[in-house]
Image: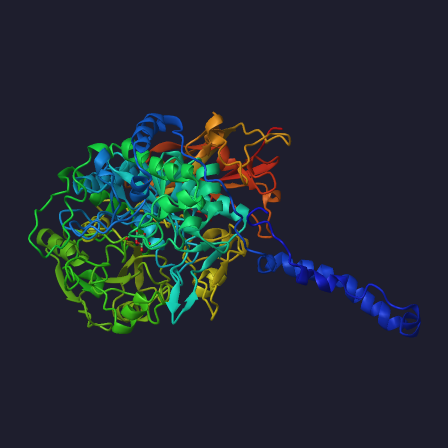
């Protein structure tokens, strides 16, 4: 059975079969009753179908099909020379050595979060694997880059690449071989998802484009490990919980095949297409089977359909079996393993439980990746990462002075201005301003706790019970919603280690030296006194988020109280929120004294400096929301918070909304958000004109033949020139372009983010969820006042296709596509249509 093909179980069918034969006598005696009953019986299936239409997922049998054998890496495209070299080395390895390179091994000599076994006899030292996608974690001498969500909000692909180039170089200087990022899952299905800030926004296309640029940049220096594969959309019940012999399994992400392809696999495919060398399988189960032993996910999707040539590493302690995980396509177990250690894989090969070719393939993939990314020339493993920052160690400088302007630019471009009335911003020359909120100032300490920054939760006061809950993998009973101090990055393994934190207070105060403004401030009170000569009151609040728990809410009361109290006393209250995810603002957004609001996201080390540039009008804000801000939490419906176990030992989360997450859910349910996906103000105005398209997409013929990756046939790629990294190469062929003109009609040079949305013909959905328009292009472009620039969106075959579950292929449908171009998903002044050719 194919994954996600709905199967209605026998018991659910029985009501439709009841009452088939009735004795004639009974009929005659109770004619009215029987006819009534018959009508009811006839209606039942209809009612059933109607119910299924909305709740079909509840009737599904969520099983992940077995997909064997594991496709062997063969050196597709430019991997061929690396595979040749790897085959030579692995050819000289004993089974024990092959087994050894698949394992994480304890290595107290450095600070790598994982070290893999080597084959020293043959010159392979193993890998240093280290976090993460927002910069090198847990050490000295590195930069605090802007976080994933901030780069998502920048909508700037060039900046994403540049950031990753500098970041990759820092990993390299520290002796890291595998950087554990970027994150393109979670994508942001759940508004309160604890790790949404690590990814680039709640849309697969946005993640795909920015994530691919991140991979390209990182891989100029190290191997990128793209994560978490796949369906890792919540932290609650992310790991199994064992208690007195009882085990509650990880949450199972239950999703159908079309949703899997069009939403969750989409960004991974883009990152594999540009050659990502490593993929991290996730903690969750996928359709009931753990991701790191899910043969459909690793053998089927990753190594079959997407023709991945690198290696799959488990998330830390995400491996839950020996033989099944090996046969399902896992290549490396981290950080240590009780399933493959002590020659268990070698023994499994000897007993026939694991095919020898599988173990050879595991080792070959690892060594080929090592060669492919020049890691045979790398610095000593983990050499720049001290095991304990408090002990004497050689300081390794990894920061590059040339990255400073990029770090600042990253910080600037992820700020999204959502409200600006009465010309509040940019700030004018002022005699007096007031600054409020603990987010305006430095956190009280930034030193390692017990040697290293274990999870960068130092600034959050986690109480004893919560630490116990974390230790036992239980969901946190009262997770923290804010942080004391300027929030520049979220918590957990995605945290980074900024060399300094430029706070808003410091940066604004530095300006007062030039402009003579007096500052009054209170960073502690939620009801501060306001000096009445204040011409502006700047309020800084934050919204914390971390790996390990999902957020308690989308807005915290204390911060809301602070804003309202200041606004009650100050008629020019300007709010900046360092938000590690969606932040609701309806408690005060309509207050006329709140004149400007900025989502400042997670800018990294230059937070204050960047904000000051925007506040004082050195630059126009240029970020756009990479998610939807609702008017109230309930507008997110079942996508507000994580799925709960509710006492189940096999917790599950049915993705019944299909591909309709975030803005698509709002469109599908016709709910008006407070601020829509793609929205953001600047200090100027833009006018869109002149939509043109030259699209030549041919509908896929009914008799087109595609490679099908089903059971037992997964090794066919090597003979098929149409397949390369990322899968079927024709998917990425251009089918045409859409262009539009954008004119800056204001007074200030500013960057616009022009966005293209397509409405793919509705008949292409297998589910009852309506199809909405979807992002299929964006371009950020700087435009001078009174100037017009042309934006061009390239459409690829994949962009105009849908995943056909029956044909197991991306199909360009027959029919009319609607094209929308404009400033956000709800502000699309240009539109037109094109039809596919047959
Ligand atoms: C996280 C990964 C991370 C790994 C190593 C896990 O808990 O889920 O994202 O790379 O730890 O720190």
In this rendering, does residue 778 appear at all?
no
Residue 346 vs 319, above or below: the answer is above
In this rendering, does residue 605 appear at all?
yes
Q: Please state the total of marks drawn on the protein image.
A: 0
From this viewpoint, which residue is outermost toward the left?
392
Residue 124: x, y in percent? 24, 36
Q: Residue at x 45, y 66 (%)?
A: 644
Residue 788: x, y in percent? 36, 33
* Frontmost residue, 156 versus 166: 166
Q: Is residue 216 left or right of residue 300?
A: left
Residue 749: x, y in percent? 28, 39
Q: Quadrant of the C terminus?
A: top right
Q: Is residue 423 left or right of residue 768?
A: left
Residue 184 vs 9, above or below: the answer is above
In this figure, which colouring scheme has been used for the structure? rainbow
Residue 783: x, y in percent? 32, 36
Q: Is residue 386 left or right of residue 580?
A: left
Say which quarter of the image contains residue 248: bottom left
* Frontmost residue, 332 versus 640: 332
Residue 25 vs 579, above or below: the answer is below
Say which quarter of the image contains residue 534: bottom left
* Frontmost residue, 524 versus 47: 47
* Frontmost residue, 279 versus 698: 279
């Amino acid at each position: 059975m194919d994954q996600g093909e709905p199967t209605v179980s026998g018991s659910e069918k029985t009501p439709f079969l009841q009452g088939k034969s009735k004795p004639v006598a009974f009929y005659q005696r109770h004619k009215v009753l029987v006819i009534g009953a018959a009508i009811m019986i006839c209606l039942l299936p209809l009612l059933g179908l109607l119910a299924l239409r909305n709740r079909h997922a509840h009737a599904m049998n969520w099983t992940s099909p077995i997909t064997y054998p594991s496709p062997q890496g063969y050196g597709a495209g430019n991997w061929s020379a690396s595979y040749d070299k790897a085959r030579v080395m692995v050819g000289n390895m004993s089974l024990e050595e092959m087994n050894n390179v698949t394992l994480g091994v304890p290595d107290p000599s450095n600070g790598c979060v994982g070290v893999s076994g080597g084959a020293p006899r043959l010159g392979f030292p193993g890998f240093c694997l280290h976090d993460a996608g927002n910069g090198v974690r847990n050490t000295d001498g590195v930069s605090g880059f802007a976080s994933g969500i901030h780069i998502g909000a920048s909508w700037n692909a060039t900046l994403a690449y540049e950031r990753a180039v500098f970041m990759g170089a820092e990993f390299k200087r520290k002796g890291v071989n595998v950087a554990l990022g970027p994150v393109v899952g979670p994508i942001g299905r759940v508004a309160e998802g604890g790790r949404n800030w690590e990814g680039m926004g709640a849309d697969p296309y946005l993640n795909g484009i920015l994530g691919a640029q991140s991979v390209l940049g990182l891989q100029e220096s190290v191997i990128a490990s793209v994560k978490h594969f796949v369906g890792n959309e919540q932290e609650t019940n992310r790991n199994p919980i064992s208690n007195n012999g009882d085990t509650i399994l990880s949450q199972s992400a239950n999703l159908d095949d079309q949703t899997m392809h069009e939403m969750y696999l989409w960004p991974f495919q883009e990152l594999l297409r540009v050659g990502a060398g490593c993929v991290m399988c996730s903690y969750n189960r996928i359709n009931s089977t753990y991701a790191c032993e899910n043969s459909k996910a690793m053998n089927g999707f990753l190594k079959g359909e997407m023709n991945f040539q690198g290696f799959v590493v488990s998330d830390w302690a995400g491996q839950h079996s020996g033989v099944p995980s090996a046969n399902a396509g896992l290549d490396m177990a981290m950080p240590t393993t009780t399933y493959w250690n002590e020659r268990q894989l070698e023994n499994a090969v000897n007993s026939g439980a694991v095919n020898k070719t599988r173990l050879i393939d595991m080792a070959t993939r690892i060594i080929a990746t090592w060669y492919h990314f020049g890691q045979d020339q790398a610095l000593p493993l983990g050499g720049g990462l001290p095991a304990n920052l408090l002990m004497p160690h050689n300081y390794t400088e990894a920061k590059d002075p040339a990255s400073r302007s990029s770090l600042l630019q990253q910080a600037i471009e992820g700020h999204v201005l959502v409200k600006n009335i009465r010309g509040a911003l940019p700030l004018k020359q002022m005699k007096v301003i007031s600054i409020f909120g603990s987010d305006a100032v430095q956190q009280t300490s930034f030193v390692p706790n017990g040697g290293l920054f274990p999870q960068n939760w130092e600034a959050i006061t986690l109480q004893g019970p919560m630490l116990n809950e974390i230790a036992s993998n239980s969901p946190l009973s009262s997770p923290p919603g804010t942080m004391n101090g300027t929030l520049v990055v979220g918590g957990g393994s995605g945290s980074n280690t900024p060399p300094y934190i430029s706070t808003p207070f410091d940066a604004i105060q530095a300006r007062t030296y030039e402009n003579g403004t007096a500052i009054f401030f209170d960073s502690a009170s939620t009801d501060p006194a306001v000096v009445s000569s204040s011409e502006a009151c700047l309020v800084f609040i934050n919204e914390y988020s971390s790996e390990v728990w999902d957020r308690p809410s989308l807005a915290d009361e204390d911060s809301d109280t602070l804003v309202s109290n200041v606004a009650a006393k100050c008629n020019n209250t300007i709010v900046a929120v360092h938000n590690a995810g969606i932040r609701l603002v309806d408690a005060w957004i309509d207050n006329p004294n709140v004149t400007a609001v900025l989502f400042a996201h997670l800018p990294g080390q230059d937070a204050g400096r960047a904000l000051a540039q925007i506040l004082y009008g050195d630059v126009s804000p240029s970020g756009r929301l990479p998610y939807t801000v609702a008017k109230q939490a309930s507008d997110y419906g079942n996508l507000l918070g994580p799925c709960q176990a509710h006492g189940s030992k096999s917790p599950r989360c049915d993705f019944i909304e299909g591909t309709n997450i975030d803005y698509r859910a709002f469109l599908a349910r016709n709910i008006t958000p407070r601020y829509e996906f793609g929205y953001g103000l600047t200090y100027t105005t833009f006018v869109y004109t002149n939509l043109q398209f030259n699209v030549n997409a041919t509908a896929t013929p009914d008799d087109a033949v595609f490679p099908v990756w089903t059971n037992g046939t997964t090794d066919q790629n090597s003979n098929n020139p149409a397949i390369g990294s990322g899968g079927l190469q024709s998917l990425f062929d251009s089918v045409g372009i859409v262009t539009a003109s954008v004119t800056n009609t204001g007074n200030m040079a500013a960057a616009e983010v022009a966005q293209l949305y397509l409405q793919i013909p509705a008949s292409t959905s297998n589910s009852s969820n309506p199809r909405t328009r979807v992002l299929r292009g964006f371009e950020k472009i700087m435009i001078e006042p009174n100037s017009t620039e042309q934006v061009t969106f390239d459409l690829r075959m994949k962009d105009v296709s849908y995943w056909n579950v029956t044909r197991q292929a991306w199909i360009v449908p027959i029919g009319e596509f609607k094209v929308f171009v404009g400033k956000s998903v709800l502000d699309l002044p240009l539109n037109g249509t094109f039809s596919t050719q047959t």
